[in-house]
Amino acid sequence: MDLGLQGRCALVMGATRGLGRAIAQTLVDEGMAVAIAARDRDVLARTAQQLGARPYAADFNRPQAVRELVRDVHADLGPLDLLVVNSGGPPKGSALDATAADWRAAFEQVWLPATEAIAAALPGMIERRRGRIVIVTSVAAVEPEPGLVYSNSLRPGLHGLVNALSRDVAHAGVTVNAVMPGYMNTQRVADIGADFEAMQRRIPAARYGNPDELAALVAFLASARAGYITGQAIACDGGLLKSI
């Protein structure tokens, strides 16, 4: 299927490994001009060379840096057609142990990069009456996972943002969606100490997902064919979610 992405411009945040890297690679393969952003300049430069993307170093925990990132990509590559917000997952934790500083750090990692990047990218999309925003969240936003209190608490708010924002910008040809990865073959899943055998029993597909499977979903949402899909949170989880 030709998604019609050739020559379009995308920014993928958190793209040096895991899901972000897979998304960036898929978009490059579809013919998009892709900017990737992360904090580590050396890793970022190597990844960009491997993918055929443009590197932009940015500290997502600094709101001004996120806005500057979007402006720099616009100046170098042209107006953004697609913004992929992927800021990584917060650490494990329990509500019983969480301090105010822990909550603030999680908010700055999960929430602010999304809202700041969207605020910088959206005016140009509205002006051109064309644009796609995709936020990578987690199945934990719908069905909380043990030991992931920060993700369980903050990511549902991003889904509220997706739904509310989508209603405000749909008239301008801009769609806003979230994608919810389940347990994928990424370092993030290893970092939270997921038990592979136990997860195989929980996941109807009986396996972890591959990052390029989520990337294919993002690429479709970026296409003109997905122009009537907005305000949604779509899972890529092998059937893990039980809710209707």
Image (cartoon, rainbow, N blue to C red):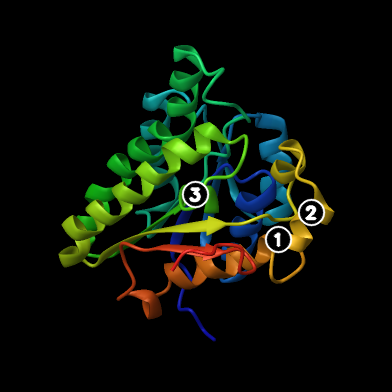
C-alpha separation, residue under disc 3 versus residue under disc 2 = 22 Å
Quarter residue 25 falls in: bottom right
Residue holding disc 1: 202
User: Relative to 84, does residue 218 appear above or below in the rendering?
Assistant: below
Q: Amino acid at mark 2?
A: Ala
Residue 50 is labelled as: none
Give the label, 3 or 1, closer to the camera: 1
Extreme-bottom residue of the structure: 1
- Quadrant where the image shows the C terminus: bottom left
Instruction: Please tell me which of labels 3 and 2 falls first in the chain.
Output: 3
143, 56: nearer the viewer = 143
Q: Is residue 134 visible?
A: yes
Q: Nearer the viewer, residue 114 or 98?
A: 98
Q: Relative to 153, is 2 above or below?
A: below
Apparent side of residue 194 relative to residue 143 in the rendered image (left or right): right
| Marks 1/2: CA–CA distance | 7 Å
| Neighbours of disc 3 within 10 Å: few (<14), some (14-19), many (20+) | many
